[in-house]
Amino acid sequence: MRHLLSTGDLDRETAVHVLDTAAGMAATQSREIKKLPTLRGRTVVNLFFEDSTRTRISFETAAKRLSADVINFSAKGSSVSKGESLKDTALTLQAMGADAVVIRHSASGAPHTLARSGWVDGAVVNAGDGTHQHPTQALLDAYTIRRHLVGAGGTADPAGRDLAGLRVAVVGDVLHSRVARSNVDLLTTLGAEVTLVAPPTLVPVGVEAWPCRVSYHLDPVLADQRPDAVMMLRVQRERMGAGAAGGGYFPTPLEYTRGYGLDARRLALLPDHAIVMHPGPMNRGLEISADAADSPRAVIVEQVANGVAVRMAVLYLLLAGEVSPAGGHERLDDRTGIA
Amino acid sequence: MSSGTAQRYLLTGVAPLGGEPTDLLLAGGVVAAVGADDVRAALGTGTGADGGHGLDDVVTVDGAGLVALPGLVDLHTHLREPGREDAETVGSGTRAAALGGFTAVHAMANTSPVADTAGVVEQVWRLGRDAGWVDVHPVGAVSVGLEGASLAELGAMAASAARVRVFSDDGKCVHDPVLMRRALEYVKAFDGVVAQHAQEPRLTVGAQMHEGVVSAELGLAGWPAVAEEAIIARDVLLAEHVGSRLHVCHLSTAGSVELIRWAKSRGIAVTAEVTPHHLVLTDELARDYDPIYKVNPPLRTQADVDAVRDGLADGTIDIVATDHAPHTREDKDCEWGAAAMGMTGLETALSVVQQTMVDTGRMTWADVARVMSTAPAAIGRVEDHGRPIAVGEPANLTLVDPAARTVVVPERQGTASVNSPFRGRELPGRVVATFLRGRATVLDGQAVDRAGQHAGQHAGGGVADVPGVRS
């Protein structure tokens, strides 16, 4: 694994190894001294062409906990906003000696362009590209699901295990969601059954080739499939209503909430063990009610915490670890001193 | 403007339209003689079996194994001048055309300033005439500034020295049905044709690639087939209603082929073109986000490729046109979303047609002459191109070696831009020579400029040094 561009590039073994590594990282984060020396002297650049404070500080925290030097390069107020190309920005970072570039970009495929171009030597980590992929989000989602639902209902160590047999419903704006695409690929690779639930206008043409089911109705999915996890996607308000470019996907927020919002009634349809997830930031009252967001089965805040551990694992494996899909993984303990 | 050249060319053993090999004598800008006996008589000398004739003013081209075609005519070329001379000029673009076997090109109107007045089309026409590689026929914009709001002065462009007959807002669709109707009606006054870029704009806001399985996975905004087909359906009905000629640019979907087939069965005066790239490339190439494959209309699916090949073979699609769209390196050396749409094509078009249609047994070389010369010349009302290879006809010819194979290296092409989607691919066929009114613009695959010929390098000079050509 030289770059992390898409969860579609991960096989089951590699994905499980990332989750196991993340578990090891999480274990260190309950210590008084959270910092590990592993990436001392290495430089991680957070190259954010799109505002995302949450994802940026998650990566920043992860890199700092591994003792890497972190440079935050935000497109806002920089040369990029003056028309500098991706190429020249990348060449600049290369000249400064970036060992890893964590890139967030509004254009789908921009991380691929960076990785393919030869402009930078370092590892490229996709932190969200357009409506394409957000692989570390899917990894933290898978990590969270595994922690709660694998190994005697979350009471035993799930190390080495995948998500075989679990059912996950992903609900909302699939069309514009990089989270949905990443999760369909990864959760399926890990053996879970994914059902996408959305109004037909928010399902992409071509979805029939995806390894998942698609439903236009949330209630029967909750009642009949009894999902183990429900993942609510953020619905942007500009998608609704008529007129404006990019709008008109559904008539009103109220109609969306009636059809696809997770409220108290729907929450009650879920099996007792089921968890409620959301990648954030939430639109309370639109795709998720306060009842659901604040319920004991919501793991939304924990997803954020797990994000740091997963990103530590990814940076560690790309910069210090030896991962090959064919096997022969280096033991995490050997390099980090994690016991 | 010179109507020919003092230089005479004897082409020995060439196969007109892939038929029986024969000899052709080009003199005075026309085909002066066909067949060994008539050539000998025309030269007034005994010609040996080896083609030797002992005449200093006759260059002999050994045409054994070469197919002779009427000079190719491109109905859809972007020469970028005026305005984007950093990507292409009339000079570099027409040199590329000659190297690709063309003797006439139609220069699209989306320049800066837009070719929407008699002044701009005359400028482009004169630049083409001065360059001398091919005949340049400017396409006039349908609407002022390609804005789609009001008709440009079509009559003035038609009456100008450029004699514009093809009108198009290519790059943009004439989407207003009233404006389209008026344009179709208006061009009847001068036997013009409206060449439509069929793209419903509201269905393609922000579109990046063909909408389907691949776009869904890549998260790139889709360009649905229906956005092309809806406009074609509307326009063939409009053309029928007002009794006008309609030409559909770069048709790309299976549904579009069906619509054209239906319209022709109703007797509607519609013609259609397909590009070389839509005959061979598919949306699968977008998977690594290399914007060299970003083009408008987008690369479609294999089923669409199969359908446009079927349509071209059965005559539903009338012509192949390149949509040669040069772009600077910076416009392609970036993320997909920021990249320009378009790919070069003049120098690979004939090879792609050979590969997809001739080598597969679906078309003959006579068919190639029809779809790349005769029919586009007829649609554009270009009278001295696309003619039969016969005595007295203008000596606009291209010689092709179908047995050659070439690896595409964009940096070695005549075009000023390197955005060829065929980089590194081996393609069959090679243009050996091109003649524009009897003057060689290409010999042994090399461009021959007019100055070189005026300098008299043909006899014992640079031209005669190349293999296969002797004085």
Image: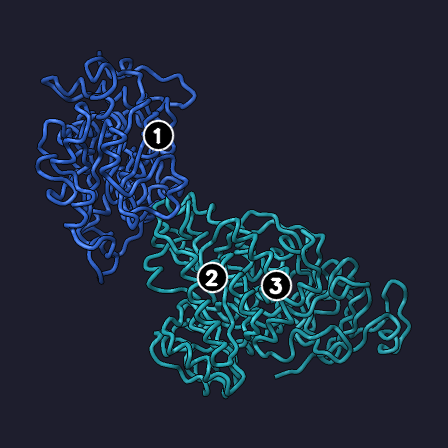
Chain colours: A blue, B cyan
Q: Nearer the viewer, residue B352 or B449?
A: B352
Helix, strand or loop at label 3? It is helix
Same chain for marks 3 and 2?
A: yes
How many C-alpha atoms fall within 10 Å of the one at disc 1: few (<14), some, or many (≥20)? many
Q: Where's residue A64, x and y in %?
A: 17, 29
Q: Sequence order check: which comes first, mark 3 or mark 2?
A: 3
Left or right position of B108 against B338: right
Q: Nearer the viewer, residue A132 or B111?
A: A132
Q: Is residue A177 above or below residue B60?
A: above
Q: Is residue A309 above or below residue A181?
A: above
Q: CA distance from mark 2 to mark 1?
A: 42 Å
Left or right position of A269 against B299: left
Q: Where's residue B274, x and y in %?
A: 54, 62
How many C-alpha atoms fall within 10 Å of the one at disc 3: few (<14), some, or many (≥20)? many
Tell which subunit mark 3 falls on: B
Tell which subunit mark 2 falls on: B
Tell which subunit mark 1 falls on: A
Three-letter amino acid code at disc 1? Thr
Q: Is residue B49 above or below residue B45?
A: above
Same chain for marks 2 and 1?
A: no
Three-letter amino acid code at disc 3? Leu
How many C-alpha atoms fall within 10 Å of the one at disc 2: few (<14), some, or many (≥20)? many
Three-letter amino acid code at disc 2? Pro
Helix, strand or loop at label 1? It is helix
Residue hosting label 2:
B326
Q: Where's residue B431, x and y in %?
A: 66, 60
Residue hosting label 3:
B99
**Which quadrant would the N terminus of chain B be assigned to in this image?**
bottom right
Residue hosting label 1:
A188
Helix, strand or loop at label 2? It is loop
